[in-house]
């Protein structure tokens, strides 16, 4: 085996759902019970409170407020997929304990481009997060996720840093 001859200067940003920095954060634990387990994606799903101690992806039939965005993949057991029990996945089954963040800076997977300060929104059915341009109206079927894109602009779908805070103002 030879010596290393190349050092790559661009490293991966991180894993969706992990903390970006040491800024203050708040996350509560819930048992997740979404309409479909395929909605439960760490780092790309926003949840609402379904009942005491229970959360759901999106705004299901019972909605008692914003629970937060699914975070902390390192606390989850890896069950893999039905075809491969060792396959890596950020999708969680229903009826497992999850962490939902309501404050802090986290790495997430955004399906669209975004600039710093763009509001983060989520789909009312699936809980899937995305962003809209600052000043744009809130689309039908979407809810503000109490978060904005932070740290850097995103020029293609992929990893981004968002800042979650209850002090942010919802787009109209």
Image (tube, rainbow, N blue to C red):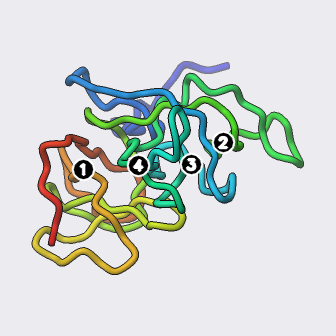
Residue 133 screen position, x and y as percent: 19, 71
Mark 3 Cα-neighbour bin, 10 Å: few <14, some 14–19, many ≥20: many
The residue indicated by pointer 3 is 41
Name above or below for residue 123 compared with residue 43: below
Mark with earlier residue (1, 3): 3
Query: Who is closer to the viewer here, 98 or 87?
Result: 98
Residue designated by label 4: 64
**Mark pair 1, 4: CA separation:** 19 Å
Residues at marks 4 and 3 touching, judged by CB atoms closer than 8 Å: no
Task: Residue at 60% x, 41% y: name it.
Answer: 32
Between marks 4 and 3 in the image, the one whose residue lies nearer the viewer: 4
Q: Is residue 144 left or right of residue 129?
A: left
Residue designated by label 2: 92
Indicate the position of residue 57 as horizontal and vertical percent values: 53, 53
Label 2: element kind: loop
**Proximity of marks 2 and 3: CB atoms separated by less than 8 Å:** yes
Quadrant showing the C terminus? bottom left
Which residue is identified by label 1? Answer: 147
Q: Which of marks 3 and 4 precedes in the sequence?
A: 3
Farthest right residue?
A: 83
Q: CA distance from mark 2 to mark 4?
A: 22 Å
Q: Where is 85 relative to 124, above or below?
A: above
Which one is earlier in the sequence, the residue at label 1 or at label 4? 4
């Amino acid at each position: 085996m030879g010596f290393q001859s190349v050092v790559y200067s661009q490293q991966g940003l991180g894993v969706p759902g992990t903390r970006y920095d040491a800024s203050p954060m708040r996350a509560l634990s819930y048992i997740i019970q979404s309409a479909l387990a395929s909605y439960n994606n760490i780092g790309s799903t926003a949840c609402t409170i379904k009942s005491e101690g229970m959360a759901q992806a999106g705004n299901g039939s019972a909605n008692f407020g914003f629970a937060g965005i699914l975070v902390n993949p390192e606390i989850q057991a890896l069950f893999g997929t039905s075809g491969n029990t060792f396959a890596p996945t950020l999708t969680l089954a229903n009826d497992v304990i999850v962490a939902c963040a309501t404050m802090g800076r986290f790495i997430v997977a955004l399906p669209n481009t975004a600039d710093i300060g763009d509001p983060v929104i989520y789909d009312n059915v699936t809980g899937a997060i995305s962003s809209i341009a600052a000043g744009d109206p809130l689309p039908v079927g979407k809810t503000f996720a109490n978060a904005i894109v932070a740290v850097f602009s995103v020029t293609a779908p992929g990893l981004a840093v968002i800042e979650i805070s209850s002090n942010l103002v919802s787009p109209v």
